[in-house]
Each structure stands twice: as structure tokens, then as C-alpha cells.
């Protein structure tokens, strides 16, 4: 079964992409837990992050680092929190979340994002990549 993220990667569903290469796509979460919450997703559809090949695992953090640095240029924060949860969508992904404290990493505070605000934010983040 094709995942929601595979449909986003294929362009079948809209997204606010900030990064796209041969192996990964990154886009803003439409239900962000903090402004700038970004998902880094391998193009290959694999359910569990740690089932990814060694090469995908090794390549994921440099990509995440580059995107995190760009997010920090746009969204004021103390850190970029990194989470691998993988329960909502059966497709491996890394959450990059601008945070002030560890309490900012709670999915309980997720709210639907405003599409026009997400689009503008994506453009801002892209400008630093």
C-alpha cells in the first residue's frame, strides 16, 4: 500500500517542500507541533526508520543537519529538536522541530497549519539551502 508520504513525494498530494534530492524530500508538517516543524523523508518507502539501509541512515543526518541550519535562520529557537517516531504515517521520516525547551516536542500541541503561512515559511527556509 502506498503511503501518504509516497503520494507527496510523487506529487500526487500537495506539500510545502523545502528540500528535494535523489534520496530525500523534506516538507513542512501540515499539523506542526511548532512553527517550522519539518519532515525529512527518504524517497524509498520503508515503514520503520531503522529498517532503512545503512546508506540511507548515514545520509539522513547530513541532510537533516543542512535543513535544520536553514530552519534556524528563519524560526527563532534555542535548538532544533530531532525525533523519529513513525507512528502516524507508515513511511520512515525524521521530525525537525524548532524548540525552546524539551516540552516543545509534544505532539499533543500539534495544530493544523495555515496553508499560505506554510507556503511562505517554506520559501524562507528554501532560501537558506
Image (cartoon, rainbow, N blue to C red):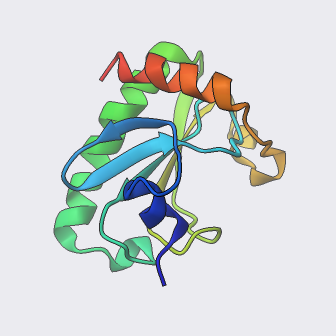
Query: Is residue 35 at least partly visible in the picture?
Result: no
Residue 35, picture quadrant: top right
Of 109 and 102, nearer the camera is 109
Residue 45, picture quadrant: bottom left
Coordinates of residue 36 in the picture (x, y in percent) = 58, 30
Q: Which residue shows up at 37% across the image and 33% down it? A: 67
Q: Which residue shows up at 30% across the image and 32% down it? A: 66
Q: Which residue shows up at 83% across the image and 52% down it? A: 108
Residue 77, picture quadrant: top right
- Of all residues, the one furthest to the front in this rendering is 12
Query: Is residue 25 at least partly visible in the picture?
Result: yes
Question: In the rendered image of this protein, does residue 107 appear above or below residue 4?
Answer: above
Coordinates of residue 52 in the picture (x, y in percent) = 30, 74
Q: Quadrant of the C terminus?
A: top left
* Image position of 97 (left or right of 56): right
Coordinates of residue 117 in the picture (x, y in percent) = 66, 23
Question: In the rendered image of this protein, does residue 123 appear above or below residue 37?
Answer: above
The total of numbered circles placed on residues is: 0
Coordinates of residue 60 in the picture (x, y in percent) = 29, 53
Q: Which residue shows up at 67% across the image and 32% down it? A: 115
- Of all residues, the one furthest to the bottom in this rendering is 1
Of 93 and 19, nearer the camera is 19
Question: In the rendered image of this protein, does residue 7 appear above or below residue 121?
Answer: below
Amino acid at each position: 500500500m502506498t503511503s501518504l508520504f509516497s503520494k507527496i513525494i510523487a506529487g500526487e498530494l500537495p506539500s510545502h517542500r523545502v528540500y528535494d534530492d535523489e534520496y530525500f524530500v523534506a516538507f513542512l508538517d501540515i499539523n506542526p507541533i511548532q512553527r517550522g516543524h519539518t519532515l525529512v523523508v527518504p524517497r524509498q518507502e520503508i515503514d520503520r526508520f531503522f529498517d532503512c539501509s545503512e546508506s540511507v541512515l548515514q545520509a539522513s543526518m547530513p541532510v537533516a543537519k543542512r535543513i535544520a541550519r536553514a530552519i534556524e535562520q528563519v524560526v527563532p529557537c534555542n535548538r532544533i529538536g530531532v525525533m523519529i517516531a513513525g507512528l502516524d504515517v507508515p513511511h520512515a521520516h525524521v521530525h525537525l522541530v524548532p524548540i525552546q525547551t524539551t516540552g516543545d516536542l509534544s505532539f499533543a500541541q500539534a495544530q493544523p497549519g495555515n496553508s499560505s503561512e506554510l507556503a511562505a515559511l517554506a520559501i524562507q527556509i528554501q532560501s537558506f539551502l
